[in-house]
Image: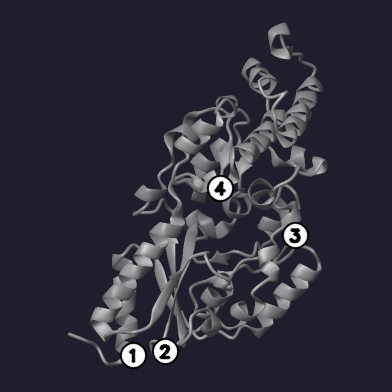
Amino acid sequence: MTCSDPVALRSLLTREAADLGFSALSVSRPQLAQASAQLARWVAAGHHGEMDYLAKNTALRADPAQLWPGTTCLISVSLPYLPQSLLHMEANLANPARGYVARYALGQDYHRLMRRRLEALAQRTSLLWGPFSYRPFSDSAPLFEVEIAAQGGLGWRGKHTLLLQRQGSFFFLGELCCDLPLPADSPVTAHCGRCQACLDICPTAAIIAPYELDARRCIAYLTIEHFGPIPEPLRPLMGNRIYGCDDCQLVCPWNRFASPAVSALAFAPRKTLQEDALAQLMTWTSADFSERLAGSPIRRLGHERWLRNLAVALGNGPPTAAAWSALAHHREHSSALVREHVNWAWQRLLLSGNSPSPNESE
């Protein structure tokens, strides 16, 4: 039985979204001129670093109808991914012998999962309404995802620039560009108040002002998006973070209300990322890296940048025999990028007052 009332359909969509594991759904008809101007200023200031794609496709970002012709509204959804308690995350971060991976990347790559669920939502909607034009996206197109979601009331933009809900920020965003005649939802009030915990906690002071991030200083950018050498002054500030960073989320008061996702099986941590120490991860060959991280977002790094990140973390950690051995194995690596960071880490450990054994220094 089909539904002919857009208001009634909007209510039904909330039910269908919840059944598919989404924590919230909103509808927007976004006005994006201001967001486009802010992005242009941000790029002009160089805060995007090497992410040149952010300076492109400006017309598509400003008008989703150019991205998917016929678009009249956007359906935004949030999908929780938190795989563990915050205490577990904090304990991992506090252990310098282990690498810290941003929680969203511990399990399977979310892009395909999100698109499959969005496709399922669209199929269910077509059974309720009838055929309609749509296309699903999730961090896969030039869309102002956070701005669109905020304008539809899915949450509000936090001072760390992420979307926030009363249950925190550990969720993925996805969108359906479509031509449904749905009523738009209203934005919600921001609830950050005077809090600036995210600014204060950032290890590299990348959040340079409320709602403004300098990606060139951000550990997530440095460990994931950046291709060259990590600026030397920033390396000691990175600690044991080898892929991304969750500090601004961990300290956010709203994430005290976050709980491990009910449907987080796909995001369950890979055993090897949870249990292997940094020195063990450093021993992976290129084939090991590809095999053990198949289906993981980390694989996009490539083995070379994986070793770069691990070397920095080892240099910031304790001078154990395992650390010396792992670094010694790569001091003559074929990649200049790896050699530079390994030798930097080697010197860092030497400054600790401990020296490698004769076998490790060879």
Instruction: Identify the mark nearer the N-term, 3 or 4.
Output: 3
Which tag, 1 or 2, sits closer to the chain's start?
1
Q: Quadrant of residue 271?
A: top left
Closer to us: mark 3 or mark 4? 4
Where is residue 305? Give x, y as percent.
65, 40
Tell me how far mark 3 sits from mark 2, CA to CA: 36 Å
Amino acid type, callout 2: Pro
Q: Residue at x 54, y 77 (%)?
A: 148
Vertical arrangement, residue 62 with respect to residue 239, above or below: below
Q: Secondary structure at mark 2?
A: loop
Per the image, label 1 sits on a secondary structure element best described as helix
Label of residue 300 in the image: 4
Q: Is residue 186 visible?
A: yes
Picture layout, residue 340 above or below residue 103: above
Q: Which mark is residue 214?
A: 3
Q: Do residues under tags 1 and 2 come within 8 Å of each other at their CB atoms?
A: yes
Q: Mark 1 or mark 4: which is in front?
A: 4
Residue behind mark 1:
6
Can you identify the residue that label 2 sits on?
A: 183
Q: CA distance from mark 1 to mark 4?
A: 41 Å
Label 4 and label 2: CA atoms lie apart by 39 Å
Q: Is residue 132 above or below residue 325?
A: below
Which residue occupies 40% across, 79% down?
134
